[in-house]
Image (cartoon, grey):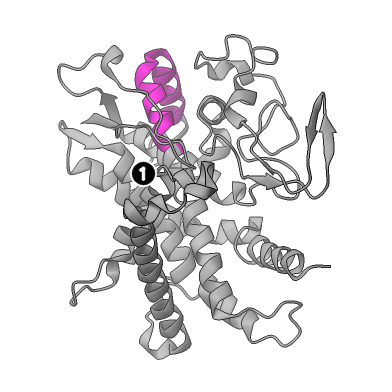
Amino acid sequence: MSLTGDYWRETRKILVLELLSAKRVQSFEAVRDEEVSRLVQEVGNSLNSSINISALALTLANNVVCRVAFGKVSDERGDDNGEKKFCEILYETQELLCEFNVADYFPKMAWINKINGLDERLEKNFRELDKYYDKVIEDHVNSSNWIKQRDDEDLVDVLLRIQKDPNQVVPLKDSHIKGLLADIFIAGTDTSATTIEWAMAELILNPRVMKKVQQEVRQVAKGKRKVQETDLSKLVYLKLVIKETLRLRPPAPLLVPRVTTSSCKIMEYEIPAKTRVLINGTAIGTDPKYWENPLIFSPERFLNKETDYRGQHFEFLPFGAGRRGCPGINFSIPLVELAIANLLFHYDWSLPEGMLAKDLDMEEASGITMHKKTPLCLVASHYDL
């Protein structure tokens, strides 16, 4: 058995048990609640003016993952030497991942990246991330210099504890820990933020759906100051809205690339061994063979149906399926639901003055994660609770 296989299985087990299990996700409830409250307050500070929902959603997701992984929000780290803050480094990482790379399509032309500066930017970004992660690990090792916001272990604490375990199948090195942290931030922040962004965009274009989901949210949380996680199970229509968003606008449209371990034949196609395979999740979710009026945003299509996004229904695979499906469903969905529910509970939403629905650019940006090409900017007005 290869070391790569052992390493993948061991790290996945650590993540699933230590970060993504139902019990651990539940333990992060206070973090989600506080960061969503911060999001609501940010919106409240800019009432009746254009608000960049895309940027706020990404900040929310980054802050939650930072607190879960590091024990603190990234912006709390000082910047006295002209160095970038972690959120800025991470934004640049996400931009680089979305940028066109000629070497991905024509490997023999990789030399172009040295001319256009892409290689230099990638190396600089890697060094900045690596330096930041080194400092985080150092702070955790020297715990007297690390002020924790909660008594529970954060992810770095867990990984360092496991690193000291002599019975580990594959010993965790610092480089492994940094690699895991990078994977978590890249996969866990952009995807949640994108889902919030697209859901709000689709709602603003579909007033009937917006009105119906707002009525449900406000009825369920009537008499409260905010929507709490205990309310989420009662928000049936909101869950349909999120399902429909994931169907029509999956955050990772080509899912995670796979490589065939042996040659195989699919229908009339011969697939050689060691071939990189991309699965078009968007095409599957909009296939007219399985979906009526597939390009229409209609949450009602999921009413009284068992179709779910957890990999059991192959016509709907926003998170993939099988052993290599996304393990972070339990982590991301509660945050997405809580954020959207509170945005709808506290505020009424409209397009900026003079802008019509037909003017809203719904073009998708290229990249691993499917953002809107132009940020979503909306106007919030106060709703009298």
Rendered residue at 39%/35% (across/down): 197
Q: Position of residue 80 (x, y in %)?
A: 18, 76
The rendered magenta stretch, by its main secondary structure, is classed as helix
Instruction: Count residues near mark 1 (Cα–Cα under 10 Å), then give few for <14, some for 14-19, many for 20+.
Output: many
Up-down: is 72 above or below 275?
below
Q: Is residue 185 magenta?
A: no
Rendered residue at 31%/47% (across/down): 39
Image quadrant where residue 174 sits: bottom right
310 and 82: which is toward the camera: 82
Q: Position of residue 178 (x, y in %)?
A: 51, 71
The total number of labels drawn is 1
Image quadrant where residue 362 sits: top left
Residue found at the very far top of the displayed protein: 293
Q: Is residue 203 magenta?
A: yes
Image quadrant where residue 366 sits: top left
The answer to whether 31 appears left or right of 256 in the picture is left
The answer to whether 52 appears left or right of 185 in the picture is left
The answer to whether 44 appears left or right of 363 in the picture is left
In what quadrant of the picture does the C terminus appear? top left
Q: Which residue is mark 1?
A: 57
Q: Hey, what amino acid is under mark 1?
A: Ala
The answer to whether 27 appears left or right of 219 in the picture is right
Rendered residue at 68%/46% (across/down): 258
Q: Position of residue 213 (x, y in %)?
A: 45, 24
